[in-house]
Amino acid sequence: MDEKTQRFVAEQLRKPSGAFAAEMGERMNAGNRLLNFRAFAGMTLTPGAHILELGMGNGAFVRDLLALAPDLVYTGIDYSPEMVDAANLANKGLIESGRVRIIEAVAEKLPFDAGTFDVALSVNTVYFWDDFPAVAGELHRVLRRDGELTLGLRPRSVMQQYPFVQNGFAMFSAAELCQALGECDFSDFRISEEEEPSQDAGGEEVPVRSLVVSARARG
Ligand SMILES: C[S@@+](CC[C@H](N)C(=O)[O-])C[C@H]1O[C@@H](n2cnc3c(N)ncnc32)[C@H](O)[C@@H]1O
């Protein structure tokens, strides 16, 4: 992968946009499906819980998430208008039934009152939190007291194999992520790190792992 392509891939992963956005959404679904489902499995989902997802992309897995407990309600935010449109389309029925809302917003300034959500989820976005304390602080603010945040990501050991990460990706091991979250008033960490089938990284098959970290918002 030449440098120009690396930059393009990095930009599209950070914020899918323009003519390539729809394809990027599909590619993310294929590559990230298992990680998303492992993140769902790491969440504490009680009946009727209100879920916030930050950076849901095209929202392909919202229906699967809502099937995991009765009466779950979901709000997804993303700052890519193309992803918001795609997620609205993919979840039309659930939106009409009132169980799903998709909103265009930035992670650093969430348009919700304090304590709105029981649980929060974000998969493959933490690499792009340029101001980590600002995003973690916003997630903490909109979670209820002792609400739970679950982050799904590829750990540093996997990310550093990808050629495009030189273009502004923050990388974390489990310990590094827990430390950063701890500095933002999250505690009670649960960590799960598991292997996945290998994936293509710039023409080369590389080993892949899922990292899922859950933590509680201290009161
Ligand atoms: C790599 S994609 C991951 C999509 C999906 N969660 C997945 O696992 O396949 C990152 C998504 O987060 C969104 N995103 C990144 N930074 C964001 C921010 N600061 N505010 C809102 N959305 C953001 C991007 O637009 C994109 O849809």
Image (cartoon, rainbow, N blue to C red):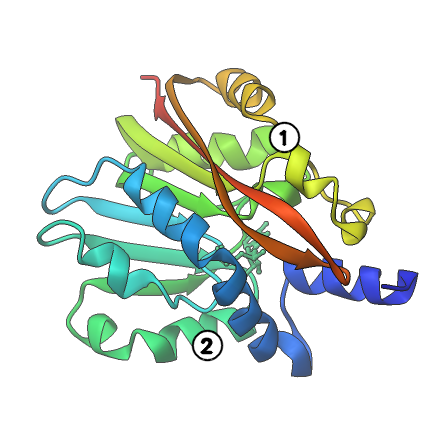
As helix, strand or loop, the secondary structure at mark 2 comes to helix
Nearest the viewer among 115 and 154 is 154
Q: Amino acid at mark 2?
A: Asp
Nearest the viewer among 176 and 154 is 154
Q: Amino acid at mark 1?
A: Phe
- The spot of residue 163 in percent (x, y) is 80, 51
Taking 32 as reference, is 49 above or below it? above
Give the total number of marks visible in the rendering.
2
- The spot of residue 61 in percent (x, y) is 35, 63
As helix, strand or loop, the secondary structure at mark 1 comes to loop
* Residue depicted at 82% across the width and 60% down the height: 6
N-term mark: 1 or 2: 2
Taking 188 as reference, is 202 above or below it? below
- The spot of residue 212 in percent (x, y) is 44, 35
* Residue depicted at 51% across the width and 20% down the height: 178
Horizontally, residue 98 falls left or right of residue 42, namely left
Quadrant of the drawing holding the N terminus: bottom right
Horizontally, residue 20 falls left or right of residue 153, namely right
Determine crowd level at label 2: few under 14, some 14-19, many 20+ residues with C-alpha closer than 10 A. some
Tag 2 residue: 85
Taking 55 as reference, is 27 above or below it? below
Nearest the viewer among 40 and 79 is 40
- The spot of residue 141 in percent (x, y) is 39, 32
| Mark 1 within 8 Å of ligand 1, using the beta carbon | no
Horizontally, residue 111 falls left or right of residue 27, namely left
Q: In this rendering, does residue 190 appear at all?
A: yes
Quadrant of the drawing holding the C terminus: top left
Tag 1 residue: 172
Which quadrant of the structure image shows residue 203? bottom right
